[in-house]
Amino acid sequence: MSFPKVDIQLQSGALGRFTDVGSGKAGFVVLMASADEPGDHAFGEVKSYSHLIDMPDELQAVAALQLYFSLADGCETFIMPVVDTTTIASVVYLSHASHYAEKLLDHDTSIRYIGVVGTLLLANLTTALTNAKALAAAYLDKIRPVIVALPYSWVTADVLVDLSVATYNRVAAIVSYAGDEIGLFLGKRVSNQVHRNIGRVKDGALPIASCLLDGHASPQKDVANYMASVETLHNKGYITIRTYVGRTGYFFTDDPLACVAGDYSNVANQAVIDKAFLITYNTYVNEINEDVEVTTDGKLNPGVCKALQGNVETAIKNQMTGEISSVKAFVDESQNILTTQKIEVVLKIVPKGYSKEIVVKLGFDNPAIA
């Protein structure tokens, strides 16, 4: 006999009764020097803030938080300061005695993004990515999908880990020497709809006057001088910042996650399916142990099928307006519920497409010889 539950299996390869799940909130773990422990916010404690000015002076001085609130002012945000002798790999380690990331995530069930502000060198990158992946997987099992953002303090001497062929699902590695770009990343995520790519040019430039690629030894570290390095980092699956010829300011390159290409290998698509996942759960959990009508031959009543299809389609359409292209649910009437005591639903989301590369074939035309 199976345990009553809703088992939602994310399918990959094809790309009235509801509770609004929202688009998710952000949580930060901020590594700070022991001398900078906020007076009203102890190390290891979680507090929420909606404005930069609401925080203790020590947190207001953190560049990543300044950048975050320049994009997401008014958004409830959860922050945990931690002494900087703690490694980032430890912060996201499920079995750590202090349970840093778990304590942050458990503070509010609406947290969908967690970012760590600090320095993460190549030597510890793989361990941190592995721990972050396990953290995200554990919370997905709790019906708490989350994306983890880690800084990567890249330097030119590093032999890059190729994240484009890795399997660190739900983890983003952001090139950031001290974690400042984590604030920009999370600010872009929570201040936009879930489907929006953080690199969308029409949103305007990032709220920064300069952007240095600190991994270069040269004093002229502006990313505009090192677009070849930016492209290499991007092609290896890292999120970084770039410039465009003819455009003023700085933009994110794209939003890859640290995993091989697939339906959920970028932040926007993962966030879209996460929101649909939560809506689907909230819709169908109401149906657990419900008695359903069957036909004279023991199959599902067509009316039951239509209701199950319509409920989830309506919930997703109402809560994801503009975030997906379409949604379609299907419940096969021929299912033998009397034997299996199980109903299978096929739910297909058609996401938005993204113009990541535009190829223009430009040339002259002579109508006289056409």
Image (spheres, grey):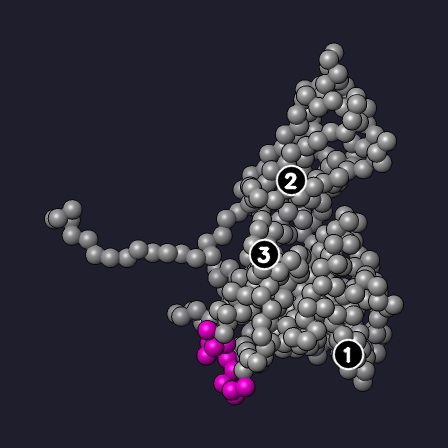
- Sequence-wise first label, 1 or 3: 1
Depth check, front residue: 134 or 69: 134
On the image, the x and y values in percent for residue 104 come to: 80, 63
Question: Mark 2 or mark 3, which is nearer to you?
Answer: 3
Check disc 1 and report the residue beneath it.
84
Identify the disc placed on residue 316: 2
- Answer yes or no: is residue 260 visible: yes
Q: Label 2 sits on what residue type?
A: Ile
What crowding class fits label 3: few (fewer than 14 Cα within 10 Å), some (14-19), or many (20 or more)? some
Task: Using the image as rendered, state which of residue 308 and residue 63 is in the foreground.
Answer: 308
Does residue 282 appear to the left or right of 261 in the view shown?
Answer: right
Residue 339 spot, x, y in % from top left: 79, 23
Q: Is residue 220 magenta?
A: yes
Label 1 environment density (alpha carbons within 10 Å; few <14, some 14–19, many ≥20)? some
Q: Which residues are magenta?
A: 217-228
Q: CA distance from mark 1 to mark 3?
A: 32 Å
Residue 102, x across and y down, in percent: 81, 61
The label number, if any, that marks residue 209 in the structure image: none
Q: Secondary structure at mark 1?
A: loop
x, y (%) of residue 25?
71, 58
Q: Is residue 212 left or right of residue 362?
A: right
Looking at this view, name the residue that lies furthest to the left.
368
The quadrant in which the N terminus is found is top right
Q: Residue at x 75, y 16 (%)?
A: 298
Which amino acid is tagged 1? Asp
Please say if the residues under marks 2 and 3 sit with CB atoms less than 8 Å apart. no
Instruction: Name the residue at 66% across, 28% down.
Output: 331
Residue drawn at (76%, 65%) of the image: 92
Please tell me whether mark 2 or mark 1 is closer to you in this view: 1
Q: Which residue is label 3 attached to?
A: 260
Q: 22 or 300, which is in the foreground?
A: 300
